[in-house]
């Protein structure tokens, strides 16, 4: 309010006020009498609601921040970010490795204990503070502002190699438009007058050979870079162009993209499930999945890997969840969003696992039949040379139509009778269970196991095109979230044109990504996947939890959520944030450090002469590089803490973007007008009702309070205008 107004002069004067209300009004700005106490028929001395005096403007419209077009686009964006390649690759692999159905139990328990609560926490702080990851944690507790910087750096590391995987999928997608598929058979080379199968392919398989030799053209060690693989360079360039265009368009356009990119994978997975169930052996694979090995649940490693998968499946700590949520309206029910997206993510993992095990069951049957044929030929050779007697062969067995059961019976007889020389015969048991237990991890599942199974599908090019198009969509959904986690905090902190920032980020990322499209690039992808994200992200989320639950205060945060959402979150979240989630995260950090200390650091190198992978330890320079990824990602945490502890840099809590400052100035003007009008209506400023909701004591997680103002939208919007003030509530 202007300091030279008559009202202000009277406010600071001890003289009695003798002017009438009409005299005062004649000297001040015009006032809308329809909203005054008198025109509302209120009794003298009664308090009118703040909204009745000055209608509260919509802060979402005033602060200039972009917003989602509708709730569905936002949900699809969060689903697209959280549901990614890990749901199709890592979850089925872990399920197969850790006891099938028994793995689902610890996974579901940890999803409830740490997944949903921490996902809800990130959604809530992003929506409440309406800034990216750097701005959010600068505001909550400036000395831990390095959390946002670490999140940004981890997003950068992950985005570098994650887009390489999208590039691989793009390469396979375009290779799928031919029949037969190029990985269906081993290539033939001419050796003099003879045509022979390429030895490397003959020792492995057609799909394995195509992956390692035709796609990656991989070297035999990380020391041998081998130069750039130009096919992969071009694929990576296409991937970054797609990501850049999607991010430049912003959330309004990317939200529309999500209608397709988030829903199309479900259509493909459903089609694959229907097709997979029609394949021979699919039921065997699904039965293997749901047959629990209960003894596995007693192993700590299973729980650690389940916790890690929950952690990464929801995208916690990357900043993408916070960035997407910051574009929401403040009264949005983020509690419902957290539960919905978490359930969708879990159901997607189960759906993808069903598809994977159906295909793996089919593949296992094919490989088992091949095993039976190969070993039957060995037995026939032993019979012809007299090594084995024909009397050992049951009379009902027909070698021209040898079933798996017949071979198993014949194998058992030979093993019993010829026990002394059996090991020298080199016969395999050819058990379906052994094939199903052969775990295929990560990229090998998509680019080796799935591609091999698809070569046996009718119309195999169609299914291959659909599958890799699905992978591209899943990858792009996650990359859009990852890039948003990088660009949003930068745009919030600096006045930069979004187009310039996005192009600059993508160009720099492409140039740095050339490390991964060398012939040895796959080894660096493995290194970044193992070291750049796991431990740093766990520490970041632990500090997020601590800064909100213990530094800012769980009670205070619960009260903020009640004011924002209009209802008190369940007491369950109070105890999870305060005690359970931090304890689990500490155990996860300790287990990760112990595993890194006792497990040899290395990678699986492709040995061309043997046509197989072989474990190699990292050379000293590569080991230093691997550990430096962890150090660099976590370095902002202590640096920012020390700099702000000794007041060497600004705390950053009031550093708002232009749109925030504009919104705050409007609100300050509104508050001055409200003070002036309250004085005119006979209230001293100290007695007038505050435009902010009065602080109410928190009665604990199970407490109850009398709701004095049911219009949460009004009080929430008013409170958010003071977001830049360090004294304001979160």
Image (cartoon, rainbow, N blue to C red):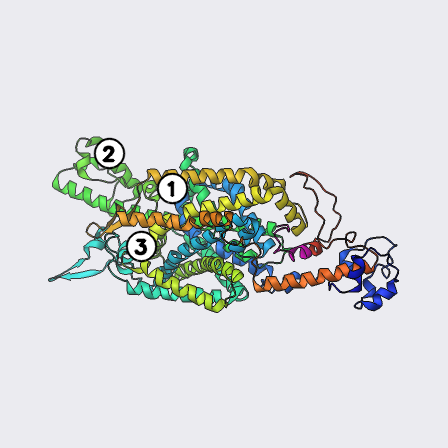
Which label sits on residue 97? 1
The location of residue 437, given as percent across then percent down, is 34, 42
Identify residue for label 2.
413
The location of residue 101, given as percent across then percent down, is 45, 40
- The first of marks 1 and 2 along the sequence is 1
Closer to us: mark 3 or mark 2? 3
Whether residue 101 is visible to the viewer of this picture, yes or no, is no
Closer to us: mark 1 or mark 2? 1
Which sits in the foreground, 512 or 105? Answer: 512
Q: Mark 1 and mark 3 in contact? Answer it, CB < 8 Å.
A: no
User: Does 726 lie within the magenta span?
Assistant: yes
Identify residue for label 3.
522
Q: Magenta region: which residues?
A: 716-730
Whether residue 231 is visible to the viewer of this picture, yes or no, is yes
In the image, taking residue 536 as reference, residue 76 lies left or right, namely: right
- The first of marks 1 and 3 along the sequence is 1
- The first of marks 3 and 2 along the sequence is 2
Q: Residues within 10 Å of mark 3 (few under 14, many from 20)?
A: many
- Tell me the residue at 32%/53% (across/down): 524
Which label sits on residue 206? none
Q: Residues within 10 Å of mark 1 (few under 14, many from 20)?
A: some
In the image, taking residue 54 as reference, residue 26 lies left or right, namely: right
Label 3 to label 2, Cα distance in Å?
A: 46 Å
């Amino acid at each position: 309010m202007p300091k030279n107004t008559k009202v202000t002069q009277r406010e600071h004067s001890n003289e009695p006020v003798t002017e009438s209300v009409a005299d005062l009004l004649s000297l001040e700005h015009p006032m809308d009498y329809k909203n005054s106490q008198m025109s509302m028929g209120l009794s003298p001395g009664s308090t009118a609601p703040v909204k009745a005096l000055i209608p509260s403007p919509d802060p979402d419209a005033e602060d200039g921040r972009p917003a989602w077009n509708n709730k569905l686009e936002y949900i699809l964006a969060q689903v697209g970010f959280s549901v990614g390649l890990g749901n199709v690759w890592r979850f089925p692999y872990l399920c197969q490795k850790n006891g099938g159905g028994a793995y689902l139990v610890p996974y579901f328990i940890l999803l409830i204990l740490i997944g949903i609560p921490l996902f809800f926490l990130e959604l809530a702080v992003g929506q409440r503070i309406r800034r990216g990851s750097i701005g959010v944690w600068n505001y909550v507790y400036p000395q831990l502002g390095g959390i946002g910087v670490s999140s940004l750096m981890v997003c950068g590391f992950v985005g570098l190699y994650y887009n390489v995987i999208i590039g691989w999928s793009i390469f396979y997608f375009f290779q799928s438009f031919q029949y037969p598929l190029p990985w269906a058979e081993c290539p033939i080379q001419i050796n003099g007058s003879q045509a022979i199968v390429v030895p490397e392919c003959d020792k492995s398989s057609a799909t394995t050979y195509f992956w390692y030799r035709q796609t990656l053209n991989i070297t035999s060690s990380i020391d041998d870079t081998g130069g750039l693989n130009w096919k992969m360079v071009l694929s990576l360039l296409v991937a970054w162009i797609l990501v850049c265009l999607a991010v430049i368009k912003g959330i309004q356009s990317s939200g529309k993209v999500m209608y397709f990119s988030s829903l199309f994978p479900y259509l493909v997975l459903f089609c694959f499930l229907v097709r997979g169930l029609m394949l021979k052996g699919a039921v065997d694979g699904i039965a293997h999945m749901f047959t629990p090995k209960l003894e596995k649940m007693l192993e700590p490693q299973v729980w650690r890997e389940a916790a890690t998968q929950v952690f990464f499946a929801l995208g916690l700590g990357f900043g993408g969840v916070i960035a997407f949520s910051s574009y929401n309206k403040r009264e949005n029910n983020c509690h419902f969003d957290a539960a919905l997206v978490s359930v969708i993510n879990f159901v997607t993992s189960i759906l993808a696992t069903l598809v994977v095990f159906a295909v793996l069951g089919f593949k296992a049957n094919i490989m088992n039949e091949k095993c039976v044929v190969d070993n039957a030929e060995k037995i026939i050779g032993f019979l012809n040379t007299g090594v084995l007697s024909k009397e050992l062969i049951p009379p009902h067995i027909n070698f021209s139509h040898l079933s798996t059961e017949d071979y198993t019976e014949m194998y058992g007889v030979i093993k019993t009778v010829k026990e002394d020389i059996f090991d020298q015969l080199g016969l395999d048991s050819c058990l379906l269970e052994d094939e199903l237990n052969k775990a295929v991890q990560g990229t090998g599942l998509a680019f080796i196991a799935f591609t091999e199974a698809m070569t046996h599908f009718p119309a195999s090019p169609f299914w291959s095109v659909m599958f890799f198009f699905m992978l591209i969509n899943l990858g792009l959904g996650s990359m859009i979230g990852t890039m948003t986690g990088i660009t949003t905090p930068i745009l919030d902190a600096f006045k930069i044109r979004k187009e310039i920032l996005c192009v600059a980020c993508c160009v720099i990322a492409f140039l740095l990504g050339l490390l991964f499209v060398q012939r040895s690039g796959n080894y660096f992808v493995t290194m970044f996947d193992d070291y750049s994200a796991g431990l740093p992200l766990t520490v970041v989320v632990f500090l997020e939890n601590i800064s909100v639950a213990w530094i800012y205060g769980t009670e205070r945060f619960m009260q903020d959520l009640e004011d924002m959402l209009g209802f008190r979150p369940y007491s369950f979240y109070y105890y999870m944030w305060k005690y359970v989630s931090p304890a689990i995260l500490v155990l996860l950090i300790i287990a990760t450090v112990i595993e890194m200390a006792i497990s040899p650091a290395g990678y699986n190198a492709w040995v061309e002469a043997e046509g197989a992978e072989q474990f190699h330890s990292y050379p000293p320079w590569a080991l230093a590089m691997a550990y430096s990824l962890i150090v660099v990602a976590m370095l902002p945490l202590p640096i920012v803490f020390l700099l702000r502890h000794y007041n060497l840099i600004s705390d950053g809590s009031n550093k708002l973007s232009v749109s925030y400052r504009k919104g705050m100035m409007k609100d300050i003007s509104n508050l001055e007008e409200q003070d002036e009008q309250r004085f005119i209506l006979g209230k001293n400023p100290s007695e007038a009702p505050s435009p902010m909701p009065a602080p109410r004591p928190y009665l604990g997680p199970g407490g109850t309070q009398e709701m004095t103002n049911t219009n949460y939208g009004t009080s929430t919007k008013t409170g958010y205008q003071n977001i830049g003030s360090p004294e304001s509530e979160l």
